[in-house]
Amino acid sequence: MEQILERFPFYLTILSTVCGGITVALIGGMTIWTFRDIRARSRDPLAHILATILVLVVPIIGLVVYLMLRPQETLAETYERSLEQEALLQAIEEPEACPGCGQRVEGAYLYCPACHTRLKSACPACNRALHLRWSLCPYCGASVTPQVVEPVALSAESALEEELPAEV
Ligand SMILES: [Zn+2]
Ligand SMILES: [Zn+2]
């Protein structure tokens, strides 16, 4: 028993060394994790330094504060989202293709310049290009007769014939 009491300071030293080691490892781990995490979420070097110092100086509370304040999205997620949005925008703005020959045509074209397929009809009231299936002009509200979408017009003449119902 005396022997144990004599060696007590020695055990205490070992214990404190182990505890200190664990604490240092934990703080080091938290700091490194924070540094990596903020780097994935921000390009600002100041934010990297501030977040890392915060967690290093006030270990656990700093980490909690960091978790509350960090940017929600990682840079990779932001990039992915911007790509998605771009793809959506592109789908909206992408020039249409002629159903007859596949040539790119602009939204306002009534006929394909390459194969003369009828693409759209003009609004009788405001003269803007309308999809053939539409029954109402979205620009001026005039009601229009929806037209059956013709398959490919084989030649310029057949396309023209479609255009002049009076002659048929
Ligand atoms: Zn065409
Ligand atoms: Zn119209």
Image (spheres, rainbow, N blue to C red):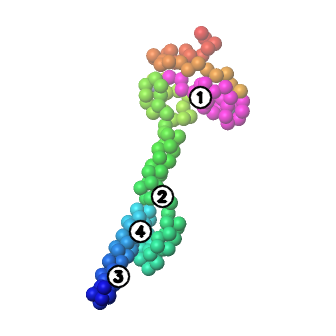
Which SS class for mark 2? Answer: loop
Q: Are marks 4 and 2 in contact (CB under 8 Å)?
A: no
* Crowding at mark 4 (Cα within 10 Å: few <14, some 14-19, many 20+): many
Query: Which residue bears the numbered disc 4?
Result: 34
The disc, 4 or 3, on the residue closer to the chain's N-terminal end is: 3
* Crowding at mark 2 (Cα within 10 Å: few <14, some 14-19, many 20+): few
Q: What residue type is labelled 3?
A: Ser
Q: Do the residues labelled 4 and 3 touch (CB within 8 Å)?
A: no
Residues 121 and 146: in front is 146
The disc, 2 or 3, on the residue closer to the chain's N-terminal end is: 3
The part of the chain drawn in magenta is 117-142
Q: Does the residue labelled 4 lie within 8 Å of ligand 1?
A: no
Query: Which residue bears the numbered disc 3?
Result: 16
The answer to whether one can see residue 11 in this image is yes
Which SS class for mark 1? Answer: strand
Residue drawn at (35%, 74%) of the image: 22
Q: Which of marks 4 and 2 is in front?
A: 4
* Crowding at mark 1 (Cα within 10 Å: few <14, some 14-19, many 20+): many
Measured along the vertical axis of the image, is residue 5 above or below residue 107?
Answer: below
Separation of residues labelled 2 and 3 (CA atoms): 40 Å
Residues 151 and 37: in front is 37
Q: What residue type is labelled 4?
A: Thr
Residue drawn at (33%, 80%) of the image: 15
Query: Which residue bears the numbered disc 1?
Result: 131
Separation of residues labelled 1 and 2 (CA atoms): 41 Å
Query: Which residue bears the numbered disc 2?
Result: 73
Residues 130 and 134: in front is 134
The magenta stretch spans residue 75:
no
